[in-house]
Image (cartoon, rainbow, N blue to C red):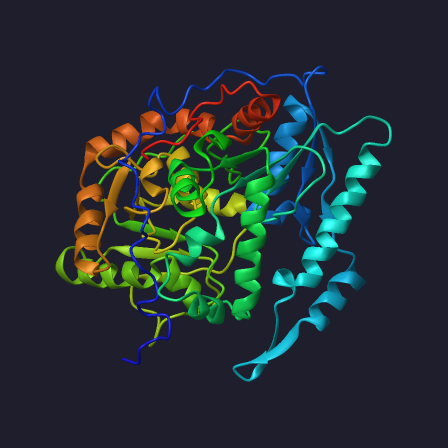
Amino acid sequence: MKRAPWDGIFLDHPIGPIEAKDPLSAAAAAVRPGPRSADPAGPRIGYASAWEEVPQRSWSGSSWNLREGLRKVSDTVDIGVEFPAMTRRALRVANARYKNGRLTTSWWYSPLTDAYLSAALQRGLKQQSRYRAVDAVLEVEFLSAIMPIPFYSYADCSWDALFSSVAQPAMYADLMELPPSNLLRRRDRQLAMYERAAGIITMSHWFARSLVEQSGVPPQKIHVVHPGFSAGRTAAAPRPLPDRPGPRRRLLFVGRQNTSYAFYRKGGDQVVAALSILRREYDPELTLTIVGVDKWPLDGPVPDGVNLLGPLPPDQVSRLYDEHDLFVMPSRQEAFGIVFTEALSRGLPCVARNSFAMPEIITPGVSGALVDSEDAEPLARAIITVLTDDEIYRQCAARAPEIAAYFSWERTARDIADVIAGAGSAPGNGVAGS
């Protein structure tokens, strides 16, 4: 079989995983009941996001849902950036180049885009401060703009953390079809933002450690606030949890896999190989549903037992959690893994890699299993161990409502608002496992 250019690109991350931490433990989460009304005496927050053409999809839905959550608990105004169609088109054209015989564009990572974002955010801040001053700005994802008033960043990872998980940053940039200089410049821009920010709010304790140990951010500047999730959340009454009696045979893999490289990054090849072992040696009726892939990303035909679905909206993905017996995604690089929280909120156990923030979501023997190896055999054993453990399924079903309550954008918004207000009482604040 021909070796793919990305085989072996990912390394064991130098920032090892923290010891598996149950997100529902008293030390990690204290869910405060009920929505909190916006405090008129609290700070006025300017919310800074780079909105996609469909704003609800920005940062996989996180940007939109966090803003809506903050509006319920604080005086939050939008200073985010929308790209008019002509501006977006001009930036694309200005950064177009031929790569591997086809035209690509790196507009999102270009100096022109950075300059446009910074200018647009400054304009938005001035407009919102015209009648009442904005006291602090919250930037989300990798915006990395330096603002003239106290500002905070909320993110799941950094360029330092991403670069150190690959064999060579230049190779990583090449797979992303970007000039290496653009990514390195973005990293330097991000480090400058960290130095000037009033605080860095991270999605995980793992990322908090990376900021301290890799980027030199002072620990007292960092606050840990786990994110919420969106799939399946509606105004309607919640669906009853499904029963999953044995034999359990239906595996599920979900992710944004628009390229073969992305499928590899999420560990899809390892899951397919494990399925082949399991169908041959354990149960030929085992199946695997893959969501997010619109064409088969590996060599050869689609294997028996694999059901390939394309990208699906969140409500349809939520239904799939109820129709399967185990979620499996041993990602080689995973900034946080909101998809795991979505699965667990429906009582679906998970198998993931013992890396990045995944041990902060999945507790072995309670909500699933973690694997350390790239080989298919250990993954296959972990899958069978979970599928046949009735106690794990009992615990997952019992914990699902608490998981759903904890991993909500309303709770996330309350905790972030507390950080910005200077309360310092958000659950999980501080750097754990350092």
Count of picture labels: 0
Where residue 342 sits, quadrant-wise, is: top left
Residue that extends furthest to the left in the rendered view of this protein: 281
For image coordinates 41% across by 33% down, the residue present is: 345
The quarter of the image holding the N terminus is bottom left
* Above or below, comparing residue 126 to residue 10 in the picture: above
For image coordinates 37% across by 63% down, the residue present is: 264
* Above or below, comparing residue 46 to residue 104 in the picture: above
Q: Position of residue 31 (x, y in %)?
A: 45, 20
* Above or below, comparing residue 278 to residue 367 in the picture: below
Where residue 153 sits, quadrant-wise, is: top right
Q: Position of residue 11 (x, y in %)?
A: 31, 59
Comparing 74 with 189, the one in front is 189
Q: Position of residue 324 (x, y in %)?
A: 35, 45
Comparing 247 with 190, the one in front is 190
For image coordinates 43% across by 70% down, the residue present is: 171
Residue that extends furthest to the bottom in the rendered view of this protein: 101
150 with respect to 163 (left or right): right
Comparing 326 with 192, the one in front is 192
